[in-house]
Every structure is written in structure tokens, then in C-alpha cells.
Image (cartoon, helix red, strand yellow):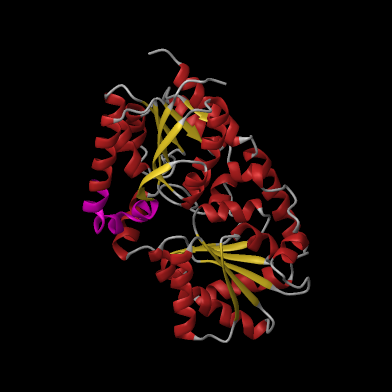
Amino acid sequence: MSEKLLKVGIIAGEASGDILAAGLIKQLKKHYPNAIFEGIAGPKMQAQGCQSLFDMEELSVMGLVEVLSRIRRLLFVRKSMLKHFLANPPDVFIGVDAPDFNLGLELKLKKQGIKTVQYVSPTVWAWREKRIFKIAKATHLVLSIFPFEKQVYDNHQIPCEFVGHTMADDIAIKPDKKRARQSLQLKDDSIVLAVLPGSRKREVDTLLDVFMQSCLLLKSDIPGLKVLIPVINRQRKDQVDDYIQTHKHDLSIQVVIGHARNVMIASDAVLLASGTATLEAMLCKKNMVTAYKLSGLTYQMMKWLYKAKYFALPNVLANEKLIPELLQDDVTPQNISELLLPMLTTQKDEQQQVLISKFQTLHESLKKDADAQAAIAVANLIEQQP
């Protein structure tokens, strides 16, 4: 433990980064009780005492073309953060995910002698692999959350520490479904589908309707189907509530703010937008269908740029197709409902048990006390002499 007054700059761009950053802040305060944290923070980071200079929602943009409509504002925010950190230099700057925003900032701060960390490796193993050279110029250290990433950095002699994922530490290897149902006041014999259309406004606009149409098809086979929709914040709840009020589908729907993990554990299957939520669903040992729709131009560009075989994180981690993943024109109510129906009605078959066993193996590979390991790696960097 050090009594030094430490100043940490830290920026997270979306809900998943907020979780990682909040855990890191909590652990860093054990090393440096007098540390000050400021940057762009979500609610979990702010609860740990981090001052946010802009709303994190400003950075929550997905897609190549979609960013263009927000580029002027994003450049303004980044320029403002650079100006702030140059006027008030932190002892270390930590960019949490959001690489297109953070790496440019890290590059400029590193040139000014400020130590920089990128927490969550950009997906250089999947697309735009030459970014690894920019990462080397921009950072003193990369903290990777997946085990296969470190080898990529080692091959290029770029400092990288595999720290695991904080969600793997927080979620039990065998989650308690009965307890989760009790906390949500769900009956043990209810058939429950968790629906997560995304944390961004655009994702909800794009996916919620097709997800609800899928649920309507499922209801014809499962009359008592209960649909639970956990949302990240009040804005997303208002968005979902407005849709429900407008369309008035004949479904049993419950919308809750937060509690996504409990909802997934309590469910019989999960329908969700591709992203970090698929990792959380895997850690909750839930079968799932994941889907995503990009703008037409972004999709055409990604078809050319994206090199990996899969886009769903459980499949990427396993390097095999463990869960169905639907993209673009394949995201239809018919496709989704046909994939979900057996998941909701034959949960205890042998194939399901094999899947859970593979999920458990992946879970154990990520369970490394990530918050503490990340804090140790950052503290070691801070104490290094120039």
C-alpha cells in the first residue's frame, strides 16, 4: 500500500467497460488509498468515486458507418479529454475497451511522457490486424481478458498481461437458478425467455421488434411463455416501454432496469444482441441465440475486413460453434424461434449437458481474479522507473 497521491485518468465507452473499470478502480484503491480517478465513467465507476467529465453514452457507438454521423462530437470529446489530461497530467491513463476512441488519446499522452494502459485488447485477431503496431506505439501495457490474445502480443514483443474477466470471478461455476427465480418472483415451473436487445439505442431500435416477433411465434407452441427484458438504464427502459405500448403484443413481458445476470440465470434460454452479454450468458451456463444487424454499408465492409470464423464470444473462445449466431438477413423471427424452441422445451437432454460442460471449462479459463490481477499490473507499471 502506498500513501502517495496518485492521479489516474480512465475512460470507458460502454456498460461492459464500466464493469471492468469499476472493479479495477476498487482494487487500485487498495494499493493507493489516496488515488484520484477522473475521465469518462459509467455509473459503476462513479459509484467507486470516479469523476466523469462527459456522459459515457457519448461514446456508445457501434459500426463503421454509424460512427461517421457522430464523428464531430466524438472528436470534440476526445480533444477536450486530451486538453484536460495535458493540463492535469495523470500518473497513468487507462483506456478501457473503446479502442477507436482511446488509442488515439493514448498515443498523444504517451508522447508527452504519460504512462498508458489499454484494458481489453482490440480484436486484432479478427480484423484490422495491423492495428497492433499502433497499439505498440500508443501503450506501455495491454491488459487482455481472453487467454489466446497474449500470444499475439508476445509474438510482437508488446507488453501484455492476461488478467481474465471480472465476470468470470463474480458468477458461480454452477449458478443457482432457483434462487434467481425467487429474487424475481418467478414460479419454478414457468418457461422463461430472457431477451436482451442491446445496451445502445440503435441496437434496441434494430433488434427489439424482430425479437418480439420471434417471441410471438414461440408463444404459439409455448402458451405460458414469460419474457423478461433487462435493460441497462432508464433511457433504454423508456425506449422498450414505448415499443410495448405502441405494439401491444399479446405476450407476458416484464421489463426491469439492471439485474441482467439474475434474469439470465433465472431463464430457460436467452435471446440477445451479440456482444459482451453473450459472454455473460455463457458464464451463467445458458443456451442462447445471438443476433446482430449492421447498416448495409457497414455489413459489406465487415464482410471484407472480418477474418475470424465466428463473431459470438462463446464461439470465438471455444473456436467452435457452441451457440447459434445470426447476422443481417438471417435475423428473422422464423429463424430465431426455430432455434429457441428446442432450448426452451428440452433443457435436460444430453446435448445440453455437453454444452454446459464446455461452458464450465471456458469459465474456468477466464476465472483469474481479474480485478486484482489488473490492479497489480497497473501498479507495477506505475512504480517502474522511466
Quadrant housing residue 51: top left
Residue at position x 57%, y 62% in the image = 324
Question: Whole-percent x and y of residue 86?
Answer: 26, 30
- x and y percentages locating residue 229 in the rendered image: 56, 69
What quarter of the picture does the C terminus occupy? top left
Q: Which residues are magenta?
A: 56-75
Nearer-the-camera pick, 330 or 95: 95
Q: Is residue 315 magenta?
A: no
Question: Is 88 located above or below residue 363 in the figure?
Answer: above
Q: Main secondary structure of the magenta part?
A: helix
Q: In the picture shown, does residue 380 fall above or below 209? A: above
**Residue at position x 54%, y 64% in the image:** 272
Considering every residue shown, the one lying at the far left of the view is 72
Q: Locate the N terminus and report the quarter of the image it occupies.
A: top right
Residue 210 horizontal side relative to residue 324, left or right? left
- Magenta stretch containing residue 71, yes or no? yes
245 sits left or right of 102 in the view = right
How many numbered marks does the figure carry?
0
**Horizontal side, residue 172 vs residue 156: left or right:** right
User: Which x, y percent locates residue 370?
Assistant: 59, 36
Whether residue 148 can be seen here: yes
Residue at image point 70% right, 64% down: 266
Instruction: State the image coordinates of residue 87 (x, y, percent, origin top left).
Output: 26, 30
Residue under the image location 67 percent in, 48 percent down: 171
Which quarter of the figure has residue 338?
bottom right
